[in-house]
Image (spheres, helix red, strand yellow):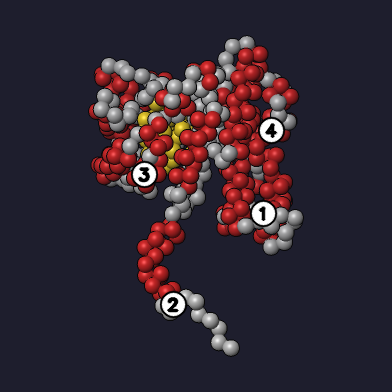
Amino acid sequence: MPEPHLLPPGLGAELDARLSGIDAELVSSGVRARTRQPVHTAYVPADRFTPATASEWGSAALAALREHAPEAAALGVDADVYRRVVAKLEREPVEDLRVDFEDGYGARPDDEEDADAVRAGAALREPATAGCGIRIKSLEATTRERALRTLDRLLGACGRVPAGFVVTLPKVSVPEQVIAMREICDAVGTALRGGPLRFELQVETPRAVARMGEIVAAAGPHCAGLHYGTYDYSASLGIAAAHQSLDHPAADHAKSVMQVAAATVGIPVVDGSSNVLPVGDRKAVRAAWDLHRGLVHRSMVRGFYQGWDLHPAQLVSRYAAVFSFYREGLDAAGRRVRAYADRVSGGVLDEPATARALTGYLLRGLDCGALDESEVVTVSGLDRNGLVGLS
């Protein structure tokens, strides 16, 4: 008996022709070459920035740790995490740094900001500042010319685009500002005979969240990520100052919208900051560390693996939270990766997308120093190259 044909002949070919453009778009969407994502971004006012800033932050963080939590129990971590925090602060205290000419710097006379931009540009020629970037003022009418002037003077004094350099554009509201930023970065790259500048967008306005899909679509391939602005965004919604926080429901909503949009083009979302600083007596410092560590852990559970730090002592609670997060999940993630690689279920049947998330988890832990490659190999059966291949 002949099989019935319910669909008309040639429908597949017709659909191929009609959907070919979207097929190509879907294949490329959300796919970018893997690069190391920092666990944080430290914002330093431009007038305080020097080539020694990162090492000075590390020394200050170590001093705070030794004064207020001289043993692991006082920090609320085990001995291994405590040892890793100390080693990190000694070896690489700041993973990502922005020379801030915006809110942390404020409005100053033009000659003063010009001088700071030139001085910062000269400092960025030093090897110790590799990976640093700049936060300019917004492209809103009142600060647009000043933003361009600062960027021009800083990179003119530097004479090149430094390795790892990123420009943070704050207070983005509409796609047209993003397109303008792309044009600025293209022009600078051409003038310095390099590639286009990478930039990231700071989301601090309700209008930006409402148009997030359009903004991300306008950003193009040189956009490095989206940063959430905790306090400007909360204030713009009328949330009382006492309740402005990373874990407010309004913050969760905004970051979820950003996360969905960012995933379509494969860029990260970076969480905001906590303005409760670890300063004062031991009780106050420990309370601030406990709060910050909890907020960082909460963000990482939700898929936000990077956030702002505003004070050197916040590095202590940042790394305590980050290292604990990866070490606590090492065994489970490693076993599931091994089972997936061997195509043997250990009680959990993982999909390819989940396997990519698991390998990404282990790679992030390796990148920041929370995990050692030898222990990852022991649990998962794969070294770093194997994890990258599986991801």
Precedes in sequence: disc 2 or disc 3: 2
Instruction: Tell me the quadrant of the picture where the N terminus can be found.
Output: bottom right
Q: Name the residue under label 2.
A: 8
Residue nearest the viewer, comparing 53 with 186: 186
For disc 3, the neighbor class at 10 Å (few under 14, some 14 to 19, many from 20) is some
Residue furthest top in the image: 281
Q: What separation in Å lies between label 2 and label 3 (alpha carbons)?
A: 38 Å
How far from the left and from the top, in percent, is residue 121?
34, 30
Please report whichever mark, 1 or 3, sits nearer to the chain's N-terminal start.
3
Q: Where does label 1 land, which residue?
A: 337
**Residue at numbered disc 4:** 81
Mark 1–mark 3 distance (CA, rounded to whole Å): 36 Å
Residue at x 36% of width, y 25% of height: 101
Comes first in the chain, label 4 or label 3: 4
The amino acid beneath tag 3 is Glu
Amino acid, disc 4:
Val
